[in-house]
């Protein structure tokens, strides 16, 4: 992605404010140019030619300059503050929208701290670049060109030496600035790691306290902080070297011009007034050039921030979100036809996978970790697209449907419950924001959340805190189930949905889910086989293939079957009643 087209698009809606700010900056510059002219007129005309009648008007003009400068400065600062806030909002919104669209492959390979550093620190740096620094650079360049023209008019010889000094600025810039940019990029990466570590450890405070790791975690934080600090010192050293060399060039050039100016006066080529005005102009020209040394620090930070933001903006988006079919209903017939898929090259997860599910039926996916159960869910949701084969829903390739419309017809209860820092009602209605209070309460009752709602002071309007800290793990799971129930999906996916529930809660949830599952196609990813004995179809997977399928009774009749062995192993772990029940099921 090209930087400047994007920056131009961001700034286009703010053309009016940009114009006002640019005009104010130009006004400040023009006012500043008046002082040397006043000095030249005072020395050569009023004093040199005894034109003292012009002195009152000149002094009034001179006294008006600071008032004009103050007015233009006020306008500039006010407009730039408003513009900066608007720009940072637009950039952050653009970046957040893009993060929401990023492909799951990218999200699984990056850290939350890295994304947050982009949204916070890098956007702030880019704001400075696109408002203050960019306009300041434009004004300084325009001012410099104007001053060079005036200085050539006053003395071409002296102007040549000033331009030689500016050439030395350029040499200094080319020598040190690339190094400064590399060091600052390394510093931002260190901050990313520090931010990621802090966020991860703070979110896992309970684990840290449980194992008494507070001191070791503090040492790790200090270690990474020192690593970032060392890089920052190198950055400041390089920048200080650059700034001080620029200062040496500034004053050396000024001294040379002063000596040569005096020599030219003694030779009668120019007057004392012209020398005074030229020296003032030279300082005003060299000062912006020296300020570029200081501004370069900010420019390099802005450049690095821009690189990092656009690196994220160029990350591949989610599956192509082109507009597609939006049928009135989705029946829920699902077919995986000759599907091959891999997350990494030469590491296949699904191999020529075939599975057909009738509408309204419940399908349980069984197998060891890594056999491809979660991958099927990812493909069904279109978090990833298949590389070979097809995923069909109601006889159509899922790529033909409008992605957002299609995903709203699915719902999932994940193994690790995701709770927002919001009320119970807002959490339940997340997948269906327009739901009524009665519908929310009904979904909560079906998920056996009634006792939880009664326990909290504000009932369904109770805030749950970050990650739902006010709820137990089992209660969080039930809330996720209520969220899925309220969404009323055509296809429901339960990823170990009852894994965190006690026996009593699991029994209640199983009764509630039996009523819910009867109306829609459902996929149940399970390790506890006792929770799937009533599924219409049980699919046993191994290394990305289907090795067994059938209902519970059919699979239990196969004495050499994988499912039968797993089921008997689990029932033996619950004692004699479980073994007796398993034998009776085999007989049936």
Image (spheres, rainbow, N blue to C red):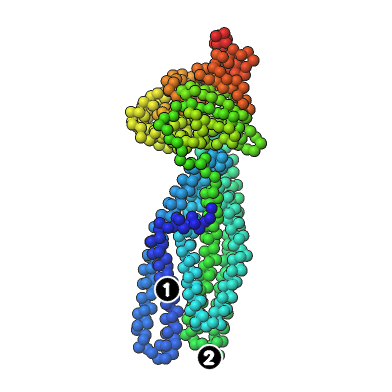
Which quadrant does the C terminus fall into? Answer: top right
Report x, y in % for residue 571: 57, 15
Where does label 2 land, which residue?
A: 268
Number of dots carrying numbers: 2
Q: Residues within 10 Å of mark 2 (few under 14, many from 20)?
A: few
Kindly identify the residue that appears in the image at 63 percent across and 38 percent down. Answer: 344
- Residue 467 visible in the picture: no
Q: Is residue 272 above or below residue 297?
A: below
Report x, y in % for residue 156: 54, 82
Q: Is residue 150 above or below residue 511?
A: below
State the SS at label 2.
loop
- Residue 581 visible in the picture: yes
State the SS at label 1.
helix
Is 472 displayed left or right of 293 in the figure? left
Spatial CA distance of label 1 from label 2 is: 30 Å
Is 36 displayed left or right of 209 in the figure? left
Q: Residue furthest right?
A: 346
Q: Residues within 10 Å of mark 1 (few under 14, many from 20)?
A: some
Residue 329 marker: none
Report x, y in % for residue 4: 50, 58
Where does label 1 land, which residue?
A: 30
Q: Is residue 572 above or below residue 485?
A: above
Report x, y in % for residue 378: 53, 33
Relative to the observer, which residue lies in front, 531 or 346?
346
* Mark 1 and mark 2 residues within 8 Å of each other at the beta carbon: no
Kindly identify the residue that appears in the image at 53 percent across and 89 percent down. Answer: 269
Kindly identify the residue that appears in the image at 58 percent across and 63 percent down. Answer: 240
Q: Residue furthest front?
A: 395
Mark closer to the chain start, 1 or 2: 1
Kindly identify the residue that appears in the image at 62 percent across and 17 percent down. Answer: 561
């Amino acid at each position: 992605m090209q930087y400047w087209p994007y920056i131009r698009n961001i700034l286009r809606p703010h053309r009016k404010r940009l114009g006002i700010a640019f005009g104010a900056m130009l006004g400040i510059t023009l006012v500043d140019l008046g002082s040397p002219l006043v000095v030249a007129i005072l020395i050569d005309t009023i004093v040199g030619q005894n034109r003292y009648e012009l002195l009152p008007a000149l002094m009034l003009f001179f006294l008006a300059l600071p008032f004009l400068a103050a007015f233009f400065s006020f306008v500039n600062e006010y407009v730039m503050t408003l513009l900066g806030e608007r720009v940072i909002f637009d950039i952050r919104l653009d970046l957040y929208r893009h993060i929401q669209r990023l492909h799951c492959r990218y999200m699984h390979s990056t850290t939350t701290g890295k994304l947050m550093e982009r949204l916070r620190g890098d956007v702030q740096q880019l704001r400075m670049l696109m408002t203050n620094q960019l306009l300041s650079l434009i004004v300084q360049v325009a001012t410099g060109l104007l001053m060079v023209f005036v200085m050539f008019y006053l003395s071409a010889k002296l102007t040549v030496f000033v331009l030689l000094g500016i050439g030395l600025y350029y040499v200094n810039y080319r020598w040190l600035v690339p190094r400064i940019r590399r060091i600052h990029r390394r510093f931002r990466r260190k901050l990313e790691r520090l931010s990621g570590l802090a966020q991860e450890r703070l979110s896992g405070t309970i684990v840290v306290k449980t194992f008494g790791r507070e001191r070791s975690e503090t040492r790790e934080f200090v270690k990474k902080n020192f690593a970032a600090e060392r890089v920052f010192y190198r950055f400041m050293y390089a920048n200080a070297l650059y700034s001080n060399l620029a200062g040496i060039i500034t004053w050396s050039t000024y001294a040379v011009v002063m000596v040569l100016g005096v020599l030219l006066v003694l030779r009668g080529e120019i007057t004392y007034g012209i020398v005074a005005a030229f020296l003032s102009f030279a300082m005003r020209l060299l000062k912006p050039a020296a300020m570029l040394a200081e501004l370069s620090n900010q420019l390099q930070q802005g450049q690095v921030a821009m690189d990092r933001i656009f690196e994220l903006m160029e990350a591949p988006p989610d599956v192509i979100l082109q507009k597609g079919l939006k049928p009135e209903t989705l029946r829920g017939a699902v077919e995986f036809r000759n599907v091959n898929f891999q997350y990494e090259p030469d590491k296949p997860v699904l191999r020529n996978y075939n599975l057909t599910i009738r509408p309204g039926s419940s399908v349980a996916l069984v197998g060891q970790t890594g056999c491809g159960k979660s991958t099927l869910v990812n493909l069904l949701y279109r978090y990833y697209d298949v590389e070979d084969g097809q995923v069909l829903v109601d006889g159509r390739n899922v790529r033909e449907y409008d992605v957002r419309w299609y995903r709203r017809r699915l719902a999932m209860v994940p193994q690790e419950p995701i709770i927002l820092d919001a009320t119970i009602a807002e959490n339940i209605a997340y997948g269906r924001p327009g739901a009524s209070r009665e519908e929310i309460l009904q979904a909560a009752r079906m998920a056996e959340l009634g006792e939880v709602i009664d326990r909290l002071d504000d009932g369904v309007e109770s805030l749950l805190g970050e990650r739902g800290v006010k709820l137990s793990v089992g209660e969080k799971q039930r809330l996720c189930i209520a969220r899925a129930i309220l969404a009323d999906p055509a296809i429901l996916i339960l990823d170990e949905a009852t894994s965190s529930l006690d026996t009593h809660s699991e029994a209640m949830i199983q009764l509630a889910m039996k009523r819910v599952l009867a109306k829609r196609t459902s996929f149940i990813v399970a390790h506890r086989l006792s929770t799937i004995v009533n599924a219409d179809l049980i699919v046993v997977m191994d290394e990305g293939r289907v090795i067994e399928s059938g209902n519970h009774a059919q699979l239990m009749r196969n004495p050499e079957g994988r499912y039968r062995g797993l089921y008997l192993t689990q029932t033996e772990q619950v004692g004699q009643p479980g073994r007796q029940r398993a034998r009776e099921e085999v007989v049936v």
